[in-house]
Image (cartoon, coloured by chain):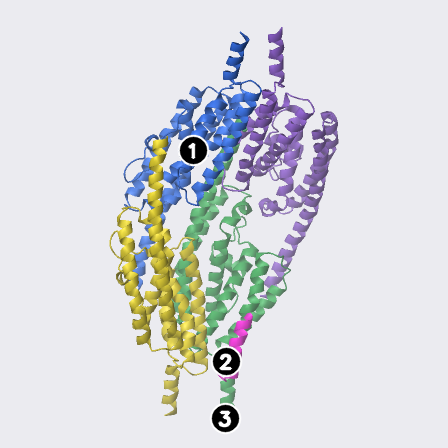
Chain colours: A blue, B yellow, C purple, D green
Amino acid sequence: MEKQFEGFRANLEESSRLRERIRVVAAEMESVTRIMHSNLLLVHQSLPISEVLEKAAGQIEKLKGLYGRLAEILHECPGQYYRYHGDWRSETQTAVSLVAFLHWLETGNLLAHEGAEKKLGLGDSEFGLDIEDYLIGICFMSNELPRYVVNQVTAGDYDSPRKVLKFLTDLHAAFRMLNLRNDFLRKKFDGMKYDLRRVEEVFYDVKIRGLSPVDAAQEQTQQT
Amino acid sequence: MEKQFEGFRANLEESSRLRERIRVVAAEMESVTRIMHSNLLLVHQSLPISEVLEKAAGQIEKLKGLYGRLAEILHECPGQYYRYHGDWRSETQTAVSLVAFLHWLETGNLLAHEGAEKKLGLGDSEFGLDIEDYLIGICFMSNELPRYVVNQVTAGDYDSPRKVLKFLTDLHAAFRMLNLRNDFLRKKFDGMKYDLRRVEEVFYDVKIRGLSPVDAAQEQTQQT
Amino acid sequence: MEKQFEGFRANLEESSRLRERIRVVAAEMESVTRIMHSNLLLVHQSLPISEVLEKAAGQIEKLKGLYGRLAEILHECPGQYYRYHGDWRSETQTAVSLVAFLHWLETGNLLAHEGAEKKLGLGDSEFGLDIEDYLIGICFMSNELPRYVVNQVTAGDYDSPRKVLKFLTDLHAAFRMLNLRNDFLRKKFDGMKYDLRRVEEVFYDVKIRGLSPVDAAQEQTQQT
Amino acid sequence: MEKQFEGFRANLEESSRLRERIRVVAAEMESVTRIMHSNLLLVHQSLPISEVLEKAAGQIEKLKGLYGRLAEILHECPGQYYRYHGDWRSETQTAVSLVAFLHWLETGNLLAHEGAEKKLGLGDSEFGLDIEDYLIGICFMSNELPRYVVNQVTAGDYDSPRKVLKFLTDLHAAFRMLNLRNDFLRKKFDGMKYDLRRVEEVFYDVKIRGLSPVDAAQEQTQQT
């Protein structure tokens, strides 16, 4: 009996050491995403997007490095990705939300799953980006949009509500196609409708006060 | 965006179907272990052990078959054992506790990890018995012993407390070598000391009343 | 054994007496901060700030006196500041939030840690203002700002949302630099973003209705 | 504002690093006390006390070394002992319970507060053994005694209940002199009466069956 438990002890301690190493990397990830989030928040203060993007880009490189370290650690225990997955998944969801928000600011489009993998240096067949983590990250990104739109309008960009509403409506419709289980992702998706509603309200405010560029243009045309 | 989400839909639905199939097997496992537990409980009513073992043996075969089906399902998604592991692990812990109790009744020894794998048809490199599940199952088995010892004494077997106490003391000492994290296994192990204490109390009762076979033998010698 | 426990009894009773004395001072602090809070709330009813400040200033003197008494008590047990710290820290956090709000009303700036110490008569090397208590107090102050801004707009001060938003955005960004543990301070800081969002919404309302002084000025220029 | 928060960041990070270093030492303490406890548990299996003591003695030296490391860490932040005290106090309570149990096995007497400090290498004016931690450790030790007495009687030592009962009665009476606040120590002390009651029951069992050596001696005398 003693010899067998000696083996268990070695096994459990190895697993503990592994978790400890993952914990260290996950803590660094948390710290990098926090800085990246700070940088991205400047967009609400109407800083030029190019400047915001530049600041954040450096952090993405750091994240990539950290995922590389994580991949190395997990490479030592093949087939156990999902055993330890819970120890860094919330950091991954935050990272996805940030790179997706950045991408949307740059292009106006949704960062695809493959694109997110590429940006974070994932996508290796052994160490990819879990689809549910990707989708949860996208839900988190959606939570930033109402605030963004409010601040853009305040800064005088009256066309942003229309653009954001279009994007968010499409995103919400795409999510609705999914048959979600009654879990965390489902709850996060359920929250997305409040973002949609808030953006609709802002769009309504802008329209009803004749501030929408389209309306303004029409009005001018009519007056001529 | 739509095409990508079409892919997610397919992916999530496949994962749901897999979970559903696992759920069906896990439910059957739960049912088989429940019957097996009922059979084993007869040992508390002092049925001949051979009869109890025979009844339970048939259920082990069924369990083996169910693990075979589980292995087939998981064979379809290599490297994802730990992704779905939570969906049948409590059934596995119960199964281990039962086959280990059976083995102890038969032999008086601890069923080793490898032995448990063999009995349940596990042990394939891809689909083995997780060590923590094995250890939790052993803790569950320990919970049966105080009741067993009380009923054995009631039925007139005054030597069982000594034997069970020896076994449980060794088992407890072996577990104490492990550096357990502050989790479910730790909590279950912490409960084992109450089993140990209870068996000690029964042994104490038997000794103090001079019912222990060793004492009785000594007394007889002295009287001679 | 008895003699030793006699010593423990004396020791525990002395510690109890100390706690009781601290409790009395802390209760007075709680009472003073409650009155001070009442006074400060008048600012939401648009009373002249000078009047509000005057009323509150008297309470600050009382607080200073109470901290003096606390310092005397703790002077009797050097090196045990943190042993009893929990017994008055929530009162200190409230006190910081009030003097910081007052200072902000007066100057539009954040009351620095050193300034808070000076106002409360702390800052002695032995009996200073714990940094976490200061930061929590600042978070509490931030919770007052959304209500303040709403009432100011109601009273016709359309420029206050801009000023408050500038202050709160800077404060939030400064806090984001900190690597907070997962504790009470972190939770309080997490709440600050709702204050920020609420102030943004008020600023948005004022802008979209053309009530912002800057817009009004521009409009006037255009009309000329 | 930024410069001030830069200072806070440095301050909080230093405090985090300190806590992390303490955490590492506390984890080693936990591991050493676990092994020491395993060694001491052998006393319940009636191993010769000298052997049990020898095994445990080596662990005490390790504990001493760890307290030395802790003292060094805390030496860097004078006056903040009680700020971080919560991070290792439960390990200290366990350590006290073990050295006190060991001392009792050796001498039959209570290990005094000063003696516990000496054994653990504490007692420095700056880094001593908190009295409440000592007392809680003594309560934990008392929890071992009922089990010890049961196993001693089982092993044929019929005089141990009398000795343990005398010790525990005196200890309980000494604790009763203390005016305990309604906290953790009070709760632990309240549990001591169950230990006392159990030992009384064992003593009763031994007496009523005429197994107590005193009675046996008397009986013999009477028979002669």
Q: Residue at x 33, y 72 (%)?
A: B105
Q: Which residue is mark 2?
A: D206
Q: Residues within 10 Å of mark 3 (few under 14, many from 20)?
A: few
Taking depth in this image into account, of C6 and C187 the one nearest to the observer is C187
Residue C168 quadrant: top right
Circle 2 or circle 1, nearest the eye:
1
Magenta range: D196-212
Q: Residue at x 45, y 32 (%)?
A: A141
Q: Which residue is mark 3?
A: D223
Instruction: Name which residue type carries label 1.
Output: Ala
Q: Secondary structure at mark 2?
A: helix
Quadrant in which the C terminus of chain B is drawn: bottom left
Instruction: Name which residue type carries label 3.
Output: Gln
Q: Secondary structure at mark 1?
A: helix
Asked if residue C179 shows in the view, the reply is no
Question: Percent from the top left, x then y, of residue B40?
Answer: 36, 70
Q: Magenta includes D207?
A: yes
Q: Do tag 3 and tag 2 residues touch (Cβ < 8 Å)? A: no
Taking depth in this image into account, of C127 and D17 the one nearest to the observer is D17
Residue B175 quadrant: bottom left
**Label 3 vs label 2: CA separation?**
20 Å
Quadrant in which the N terminus of chain B is drawn: top left
* Same chain shared by disc 3 and disc 1: no
Predominant SS of the magenta segment:
helix
